Each structure stands twice: as C-alpha cells, then as structure tokens.
C-alpha cells in the first residue's frame, strides 16, 4: 500500500516523518546531554536528510533542547517548521509540573522565543496536563484564550493541542483554529481512532507520541516477529504502520544517535502489504 510522504500543516508542505527533540536533553529529559556534539550532529543530519518538522519544548531540559536547536540550526532554513509546546515546567527534582495560567503560558512562549532565537513561534501546542499520561475531561477555555491572545499579538502563528479529548478540541475551536493535535496513539493504544479520522476530515494534523508505549510482552513479541519477517526493526514497523494508518498522521520519533535517526527515517520507505497490515492489526488485539 502506498501513501503520501507529505501533508499540509501550518501553511507549509511538511514531510510526514519529522524529528522529536526530547531525547537531546539529559537522562529523564533533564539537564544537559551526555554528548552535546552528538546532539548537534543529530539535528544537522535530520535536516540534511530532508526533515523539515522538528518538535520541541522549552520544558525539555529545561531550556536545553531549544538551546541546542538554536546552536545547531540557526539561522533556520525557510522550509523548517519548529513546533513547540507550553503548559508545564520542571521542578528542581525533575518533576513535570502544570503551568497553565495565563502568566505561565506567556512566560513559556517568551522562553521558547528567546532560547530558539525567534521573533514568532510557528506552532505552539498547549499541553493539557490532565492526569499527565492521558487526557481527562474538563474545560480548557482559559488556557486556549491565553494562547490565542499571544497569537493575536503576533508571537504565535498557529495553535495546537496536546493530551486532549474530542470535547476539549471542540471547545478550543470555538476560540481559535486548531492546527494539530498531539496525543498518545500507536498500534496497540488506539483510543483516538475515531478522533484521527474526524481531524483528517477537517484537514488537522495528528501527531502521535509513544509509538512503542504501552505494549504488553505478548504484543511486543508479536511485533518483533512480524518485524523480523519483513527485515525491519520493531520501531520501523510501528512507524510505518502509523504512516499507513491515516494521511494526516505526522511522526516525530526522537533519538540522540545519528545511526538511530537514519534507521527511523527508513520507516518511510518500508512497504507493508495488506497481509502484513492485517497481522499488525491483530497485534493490537493480543493480550
């Protein structure tokens, strides 16, 4: 089965295989990387291989990944889309803490602008903390209004949402246009199946995180078996399945290794037959 390798996003034509910068920070996404030169090399290699969508946040590190992105890539190519996020801060113990008030959100936008070396942010995802690892219902109007006010001031071009429900997306759309949604979704974690298709009908990008998160040992074993049968790694197969799943899915696999980056990007050229896709669908039902 074939699919488009690009998708219209935030007024650009974006390659569906992007890069997530979270792993450029230190262990636990906290502090500096073990090898800063290697982190710089990964970013430069990503662009050299055609990646034009980088996902980051100033609470990775904190500040670390954005500073590395600036050092590696500034001044940025015209076709590069940098997507960042706000809604959390890091505690001194590396805890992920909600930062959802209007002053919190404005401070975070300015932190991202400063550390990335930008006058305006292309896309800002509002991360709703919920129960941290999954969406939970509740109004997000106050947070979206705060981000929309910054958009009106020209500091933010497009608004996205992360860790949200369908009802929260609808609420946000009553305040501002939503360019993308970032939620936990993969081969076995498919709560957002209907949401992905609904967003696709609206031309809204869906950016899944944790492509291998939440697999049971049996599911992981089945994925390993299928991957070996097609000459791929489990990660390549999981990423290729996501590319086949829906045209509005954009991927942001992260790594701090150039070799692993190249390996991930090969997922875009991995052919999947109908038979293999059917096998993969069954993995999600295994226990």
Image (tube, rainbow, N blue to C red):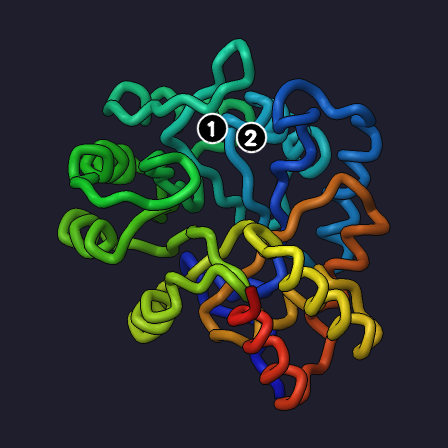
Q: Quadrant where the N terminus lies?
A: bottom right
Whether pointer 2 and pointer 1 mark residues with C-beta atoms closer than 8 Å, the reply is: yes
Q: Nearer the viewer, residue 22 or 71?
A: 22
Relative horizontal placement of residue 85, taking residue 186 as reference (left or right) = left
- Asked if one can make out residue 230 in the rendered structure from this viewpoint, the answer is yes
Q: Nearer the viewer, residue 151 or 36?
A: 36
Q: How far apart are marks 2 and 1 (CA)?
A: 5 Å
In the rendered image, the residue lying farthest to the front is: 287
Location of mark 1 (residue):
113
Residue 179 higher or lower than 156, as above or below: below
x and y percentages locating residue 194 in the rendered image: 33, 70
Residue found 24% across the figure and 53% down from its top: 169
| Badge 2: residue crowd in 10 Å (few <14, some 14–19, many ≥20) | many
Residue 116 circle label: 2
x and y percentages locating residue 275 in the rendered image: 65, 89
Task: Please tell me whether mark 1 sits on a helix, a strand or a loop.
Answer: helix
Residue found 70% across the figure and 29% down from its top: 71
Residue 179 circle label: none
x and y percentages locating residue 214 in the rendered image: 55, 52
Which of the 4 image quarters holds residue 132?
top left
Residue found 44% across the figure and 21% down from its top: 89
Residue found 43% across the figure and 40% down from its top: 133
């Amino acid at each position: 089965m074939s699919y488009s390798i690009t998708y219209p996003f935030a007024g650009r034509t974006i390659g569906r295989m992007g890069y997530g910068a979270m792993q450029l920070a230190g262990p636990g996404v906290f502090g500096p990387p073990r090898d800063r030169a290697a982190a710089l090399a990964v970013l430069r290699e990503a662009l050299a291989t055609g990646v034009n969508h980088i996902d980051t946040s100033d609470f990775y590190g904190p500040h670390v990944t954005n500073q590395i992105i600036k050092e590696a890539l500034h001044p940025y190519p015209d076709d590069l889309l940098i997507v960042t996020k706000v809604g959390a801060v890091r505690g001194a113990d590396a805890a992920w803490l909600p930062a959802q008030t209007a002053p919190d959100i404005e401070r975070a936008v300015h932190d991202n602008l400063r550390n990335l070396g930008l006058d305006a942010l292309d896309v800002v995802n509002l991360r709703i903390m919920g129960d941290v690892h999954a969406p939970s219902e509740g109004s997000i109007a106050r947070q979206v209004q705060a981000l929309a006010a910054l958009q009106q001031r020209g500091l933010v071009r497009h608004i996205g949402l992360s860790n949200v429900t369908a009802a929260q997306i609808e609420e946000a759309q009553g305040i501002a246009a939503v360019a993308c949604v970032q939620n936990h979704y993969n081969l076995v974690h498919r709560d957002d199946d209907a949401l992905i298709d609904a967003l696709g009908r609206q031309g809204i990008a869906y950016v899944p995180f944790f492509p291998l998160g939440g697999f049971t040992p049996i599911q992981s074993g089945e994925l390993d078996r299928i991957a070996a049968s097609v000459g791929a790694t489990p990660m390549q197969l999981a990423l290729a399945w996501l590319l086949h799943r829906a045209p509005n899915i954009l991927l942001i696999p992260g790594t701090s290794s150039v070799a692993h980056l190249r390996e991930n990007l090969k997922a875009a050229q991995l052919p999947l037959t109908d038979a293999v896709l059917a096998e993969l669908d069954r993995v999600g039902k295994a226990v």
